[in-house]
Image (tube, grey):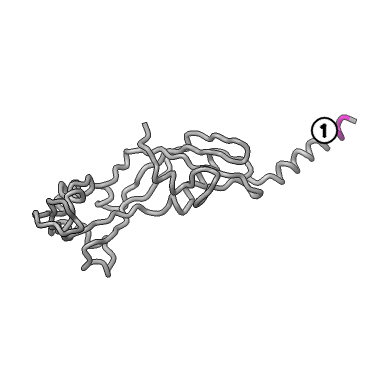
């Protein structure tokens, strides 16, 4: 009598396990897969370079200071346009070394423009550091870093710096998903990445 009961109980447990999707349980591995595979996480970081007349704020920004330090840009003081006041303003140009560095990174149609974007870094997920669930919603804390895509990216984004973000998840009938876009159920991933803080 006992053997048939154990067999029935085992069969029911097996059926329950088979009917569950791997996405039904929000594990650290599932959270990592969903975050790292999302479009918001995979989009490369663009660096915007502007030549010509720039404001003092732009000229003294950390990114432009690093480009100056590398000898890729030079500038001379010029009069400000009405849209760039208050003075001083700067006429910014690429040096020969800067032209060599940026030439292969600029899209063919952008070489004559005074403002252009180049892909500079991509994100790498370092670790899921915690999951806080409450019913069918959860907040997942994770750390990530920038991986430079080229010499410019390596100058601006340091791979040894870690960032901490918190993304929101929601459980649907087909399992857990990242919250996207405007939602009443927590912070979407693109906002979590924008609001990242340096990890300790």
The residue that label 1 is drawn on is 6
Q: Nearer the viewer, residue 6 or 16?
A: 16
**Magenta segment boundaries in residue numbering:** 2-6
Q: Position of residue 146 (x, y in %)?
A: 35, 45
Q: Is residue 178 left or right of residue 25?
A: left
Choose between 29 and 194: the one closer to the eye.
Answer: 194
36 within the magenta span? no
Q: Relative to the observer, which residue lies in front, 168 or 131?
A: 168
Q: Position of residue 70 (x, y in %)?
A: 16, 49
Q: Quadrant of residue 22?
A: top right
The residue depicted at 53 percent of the width and 35 percent of the height is: 131
Q: In the image, what residue occupies the spot 47% across and 34% down?
A: 129
x, y percentage for residue 157?
A: 29, 45
Residue at x-position 45% and y-position 38%: 142
Q: Quadrant of residue 98?
A: bottom left
Outermost residue to the right:
1
Question: At 24% across and 56% down in the image, what residue appears?
Answer: 49
Q: Is residue 95 left or right of residue 146?
A: left
Give how far across and how far down residue 165 sits, in percent. Answer: 43, 40
Predominant secondary structure in magenta?
helix
Q: Residue furthest top?
A: 2
In this picture, residue 161 sits left or right of residue 129:
left
User: Compared to 182, does 161 lie above or below?
Assistant: above
The mark tally for this picture is 1
Residue farthest bottom in this picture: 109
Quarter occupied by the N terminus: top right
């Amino acid at each position: 009598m006992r053997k048939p009961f154990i067999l029935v109980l085992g069969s029911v447990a097996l059926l329950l396990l088979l009917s569950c999707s791997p996405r039904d349980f929000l594990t650290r591995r599932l959270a990592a897969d969903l975050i790292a595979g999302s479009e918001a996480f995979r989009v490369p970081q663009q660096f915007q370079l502007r030549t010509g007349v720039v404001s003092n704020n732009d000229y003294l920004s950390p990114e432009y200071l690093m480009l100056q330090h590398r000898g890729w840009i030079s500038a001379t003081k010029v009069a400000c346009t009405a849209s760039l006041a208050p003075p001083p303003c700067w006429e910014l140009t690429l040096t020969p070394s800067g032209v060599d560095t940026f030439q292969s990174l600029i899209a063919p149609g952008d070489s004559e423009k005074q403002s252009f974007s180049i892909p500079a870094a991509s994100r790498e997920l370092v670790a899921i550091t915690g999951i806080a669930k409450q019913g069918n919603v959860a907040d997942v804390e994770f750390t990530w870093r920038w991986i430079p895509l080229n010499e410019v990216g390596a100058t601006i984004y340091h791979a040894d710096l870690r960032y901490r973000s918190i993304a929101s998840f929601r459980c649907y009938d087909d399992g857990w998903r990242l919250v996207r876009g405007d939602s009443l159920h927590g912070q979407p991933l693109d906002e979590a990445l924008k609001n990242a803080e340096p990890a300790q």
